[in-house]
Image: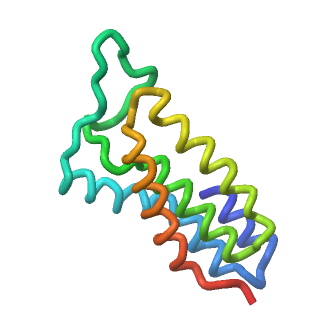
Amino acid sequence: MGIGVLLAVVDPGNHEAWLICAALGPVAIGLNFVVKLIVRRPRPELAGLPPLGGAPSSLSFPSAHATSSFAVATAMTRVAPEAAIAFVLAAALALGRPYLGMHYPSDVLVGAALGVVLGLIVPLSL
């Protein structure tokens, strides 16, 4: 959020678009939680391999980290194409979720896809 607000200040020509980017992360997490409540898929449980991280809920599908990071990466790239480096960061974050034992790979893939769709709501910068 902070980066989006900062960019709205330093790039007044895209002020509104950067503010949308700033708000998109929390919006994506909220929407993601609604999907989790509908699907109700439990997090992975592997005997002898406890998860390496904690989570605020026991629900797994889709990954909120993947959803929010890909939503913001998509949105920022639409405002400034040079921000595409954000996809590298989003992918690194998302790929770590199964490793940490927090998600199935399909949780991450669907979360990333949902995030990209959400990111497309940001208008292209002209």
Q: Which quarter of the picture shows residue 110?
A: bottom left
Task: Please report the residue visible at 69 percent of the width from the left and 70 percent of the height from the top.
Answer: 77
Task: Please report the residue visible at 57 percent of the width from the left and 73 percent of the height from the top.
Answer: 20
Task: Please report the residue visible at 48 percent of the width from the left and 36 percent of the height from the top.
Answer: 97
Residue 39 on image: x %, y %:
20, 53
Screen quadrant of the N terminus? bottom right
Residue 104 on image: x %, y %:
37, 38
Screen quadrant of the C terminus? bottom right
Q: Is residue 8 left or right of residue 10?
A: left
Residue 27 on image: x %, y %:
43, 64
Q: Give the colour scheme shown.
A: rainbow
Task: Please report the residue visible at 29 percent of the width from the left and 34 percent of the height from the top.
Answer: 43
Which residue lies most toward the top here? 48
Given residues 33 and 66, the one toward you in this image is: 66
Q: Which quarter of the picture shows residue 28?
A: bottom left
Up-down: is 66 above or below 56? below
Q: Is residue 4 left or right of residue 97?
A: right
Given residues 25 and 50, the one toward you in this image is: 50
Up-down: is 57 above or below 52? below
Given residues 44 and 53, the one toward you in this image is: 44
- Count of all numbered marks drawn on residues in the image: 0
Residue 24 on image: x %, y %:
51, 66
